Amino acid sequence: MKRSTKKLIIISILSLMVLSITAGIYLYNKGPMDVKSVRGIRVSATELYNLFTTDSVFAGKKFTGRVVQVEGEVTRISSNNSNQKVVLIKTGTDGAYVNCTLEGPDMNTALSHTIRIKGICSGIGQGDADLGIPGDVYVTRCYIATN
């Protein structure tokens, strides 16, 4: 091998290493997504649930890991073990809900009222087909949408 070819290979490898390290440092320091400032994909609770139950691959690619604004009627409000409010939004399917864990204040969320919640979609849970329990669609790090 010629000396200039070896030199070119070494420079190329070093350049790739520097680019990889720079990208790694950027991604490490990037931090979590700011759910409040992202607009999100607007979708009704019924439509979101139906998309996951009819074509989970398509719905997973479109919604999972992304910020969504889910609109629907509040069915139940409770608290989880971390004292965060959990709002269940009606989907039109008996026993199936869009399960939203609030990170911010609930701003007087009331039952049977229509609400729009913004958060990160985690996908659909399994449920239990043998017992006839459908899975819920989970949305985490939620805030009440104001826009």
Image (cartoon, rainbow, N blue to C red):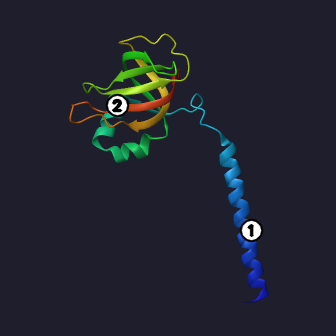
The N terminus: image quadrant: bottom right
Residue 110 rendering spot, x and y as whole percentages: 42, 10
Depth check: give the residue in front, 144 or 105.
105
Residue 37 rendering spot, x and y as whole percentages: 60, 30
Depth check: give the residue in front, 77 or 62.
77
Q: Do the residues labelled 1 and 2 touch (CB within 8 Å)?
A: no
Q: Name which quarter of the figure residue 127 lies in.
A: top left
Identify the element where label 2 is drawn: loop
Tell me the amino acid under the disc marked 1.
Leu
Residue shown at the point (20%, 35%) measured from the top left: 130
Residue shown at the point (56%, 20%) measured from the top left: 104
| Residue 146 sits above or below residue 29 on the image | above
Residue 87 rendering spot, x and y as whole percentages: 42, 20
Residue 41 rendering spot, x and y as whole percentages: 46, 35
Circle nearer the N terminus (1, 2): 1
Report the number of discs. 2
Q: Which mark is residue 69?
A: none
Residue shown at the point (74%, 84%) measured from the top left: 5
Residue shown at the point (71%, 50%) measured from the top left: 25
Residue at the spot of label 1? 14
Identify the element where label 1 is drawn: helix
Q: Furthest residue to the bottom?
A: 1
Q: Name which quarter of the figure residue 8 lies in.
A: bottom right
Residue at the spot of label 2? 136
